[in-house]
Image: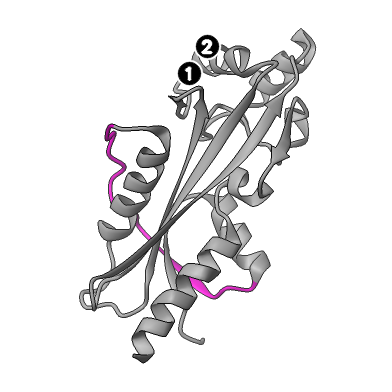
Amino acid sequence: MSRPRLLLASTSPRRSRLLNEAGIRFALVEPGPEPMGCGTPVQLALFRAREKAVGARFAAGESVPVLGVDTVVDLGGTEFGKAGTREAAESMLRQLSGRVHHVHTGHCLHVPATGTTVEEVVTAEVVFTTPTEVQLEAWLASGLWRGKAGAYGIQDPLAAFASLHRGPLDAVVGMHVDAVLRLLARVEQEALQ
């Protein structure tokens, strides 16, 4: 088996799928703990991505870069995280309904052997229609809201009330592949110097 191009510090099946679809060789590692942090939603996305990458569990002296990613839903400067309960998910969705919000995805690529760290945040805008009570109940009953910032997954057919307004769709799904490729190019270029 060929050497991975990066180590993905994530438990998200969506992020693994995006890397697989892009043909980027990777191996999974356990991410560092996700701290709460404080700051703006953009700052939080980057801070958490960095903590996941830098705190990941891997072999000492690893020269393969470690990728940490974090996605934050931002409505008017307020972060909407992962809902812990169905009631919390419903509350988030009702607040997002009929409005445009931002989704910030922070990417951090860290090379443990050299300490090199490169980062990028990608922002997209998502618009919500106001779901009917039937649509909302179907979404909540599906359980697909679990583990997703803002309690929705734009890629899920039952979340038809969410649509991309501006920016890259994959950043809303959980990782912008072009950003990952740019970060890889930067660390690979640095390694040649």
Res. 31 image quadrant: bottom left
Q: Is residue 17 in the magenta section?
A: no
Figure check: 9 above or below 140: below
Secondary structure under the numbered disc 2 in the rendered image: helix
Picture coordinates of residue 108, whole percent (x, y): 39, 59
Asked if labels 1 and 2 touch by Cβ distance under 8 angstroms, the answer is yes
Picture coordinates of residue 22, whole percent (x, y): 65, 68
Figure check: 7 above or below 114: above
Disc on res. 188: none
Tell me the magenta residue range: 23-38
Q: Is the magenta stretch mostly helix, strand or loop?
A: loop
Secondary structure under the numbered disc 1 in the rendered image: loop
Q: Which amino acid does label 2 sit on?
A: Glu
Q: What residue type is labelled 1?
A: Thr
Q: Residue at x 68, y 37 (%)?
A: 154
Pick the front one: 20 or 185: 185
Q: Residue furthest top?
A: 133
Write down the residue under mark 1: 85
Res. 150 image quadrant: top right
Per the model, the C-alpha gap separating discs 2 and 1 is: 5 Å
Picture coordinates of residue 102, whole percent (x, y): 57, 33
Q: Is residue 36 in the magenta section?
A: yes
Figure check: 4 above or below 22: below
Mark 2: few/some/many CA within 10 Å (<14, 14-19, 20+): few
Mark 1: few/some/many CA within 10 Å (<14, 14-19, 20+): few
Left or right of 146 in this view: 100: right
**Which quarter shows the C terminus?**
bottom left
What coloring was used for the rendering? one colour
Res. 129 image quadrant: top right
Write down the residue under mark 2: 87
Pick the front one: 88 or 76: 76
Left or right of 41 in this view: 99: right
